[in-house]
Image (cartoon, rainbow, N blue to C red):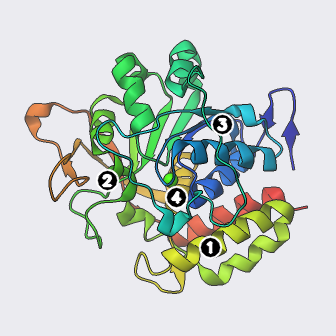
Amino acid sequence: MGKNSQRGGFVGRDERSVWLDMDPGIDDCWALIIAAARARLNGVSAVAGNAPLANTYGNARKLLQLLGLEPTLALPGAENPLLGRLISAPDFHGKSGVGDWVNEPVAVPLDSPRVWDWWIRHHHQLCQCDLIATGPLTNLAVSLLSAPQLGGSWKSVTCMCGATPGSQVDKAQEFNIYVDPHAADIVFHWMENLRLIGINVAHRALIPLADLPRLRQYGKIGQVLGEMLNFYSRRARGEGGDLEAFPVDDVVAVASAIEPDLFRWQELPLAVVREGPLRGTVVISPIDLKRKPVKVAVDVDVEGFRHWVWESMDFYLG
Ligand SMILES: [Ca+2]
């Protein structure tokens, strides 16, 4: 594996810098592993989502350690959505967020800096960095409420959430956006250079169950990831319509940020339904809201995506 101790992180196959904002979460873990193979990780911020913040923050730290990276690259974010109580996803990700992988929650001290403090303090560095968000968008929204100019600070921002307006999917809502629809609407309003991956695309780019034994060739990282994906794939298989495959939404988001040509995009101004039975549904914004267009993924090269995933994993060949 290629380490670069001088900068405290891996150098992947290009010199791109990324920041991951996530709620690990099993597919978040795979997304982090692949992002670390492809790019330099500037930071990983945790948000409450698939599990409470103490779990998602602890999971991010432990995974960074597994990859030989500094656990201090992880920063804590929000413990709750902007409004209402946290909804987590133990059915898919286990109570800890990472299936049966033994892990302890890491309590966040009251006086610990939160990620939006770091972003504000280091805002001049963000223009070099692609932000990829694969959890509820609470951290991004808090940063924008605190300092709206951060919306124009990133090189690009990719969010895994929702579903493209007008797409035919088995559910109108998706977990990240359903957990904190108010945060998503703020992000759609204020964030510039924004790309959206919805489940209408992510649930097409499925990984066949038959591919999982390939993980055995990647040593300890492959073993840990394999155990997690065995847990997750048993629960998520069939999402997307194929019982012999499972979705890896957060990995798709990383692919779309690093290899956007694998996707077809359309520009649309977006808003989010925040309350009621359609909570979390993405709609084309009414003209009077005057929103900037978002680049929305409308199609994916499925075979190209799968090839990219395993090519990325080869970074970890022993
Ligand atoms: Ca996630």
Which residue is rendered at x = 31% and y = 53% of the image?
Answer: 178
The x and y percentages for residue 43 are 64, 33
Residue 225 lies, in percent from the top left, at 71, 64
> Where 192 sits versus 60, above or below?
above
Q: Secondary structure at mark 2?
A: helix
257 left or right, relative to 211: left
Q: Residue at x 57, y 57 (%)?
A: 97
Whole-angstrom CA distance, mark 2 to mark 1, is 23 Å
- Label 3, on which residue? 16
Q: Residue at x 51, y 47 (%)?
A: 52
Q: Nearer the viewer, residue 296 or 110?
A: 110
Question: The disc labelled 3 sits on which kind of residue?
Answer: Arg
Q: State the CA–CA distance, disc 4 to disc 1.
A: 19 Å
Corner quadrant of residue 113? top right
- What residue sits right under mark 1 in the picture? 231
Q: Mark 4, mark 2: which one is toward the viewer? A: 2
Q: Earlier in the sequence, mark 4 or mark 1?
A: 1
- In the rendered image, which residue does mark 4 sit on? 252
Q: Earlier in the sequence, mark 1 or mark 3?
A: 3
Could you tell which of marks 2 and 3 lies nearer the N-terminus?
A: 3
Report crowding for label 3: few under 14, some 14 to 19, many 20 or more residues within 10 A (C-alpha): some
First in sequence: mark 2 vs mark 1: 2
Q: Which residue is mark 2?
A: 178
- Marks 2 and 3 sit apart, C-alpha to C-alpha, by 31 Å
Dot 4 or dot 3: first in sequence order is 3
Dot 4 falls on a residue whose secondary structure is helix
Q: Quadrant of residue 271?
A: top left
x then y, percent, for residue 152: 41, 23
**In front: mark 4 or mark 3?**
4
Is residue 90 visible in the rendered image? The answer is yes
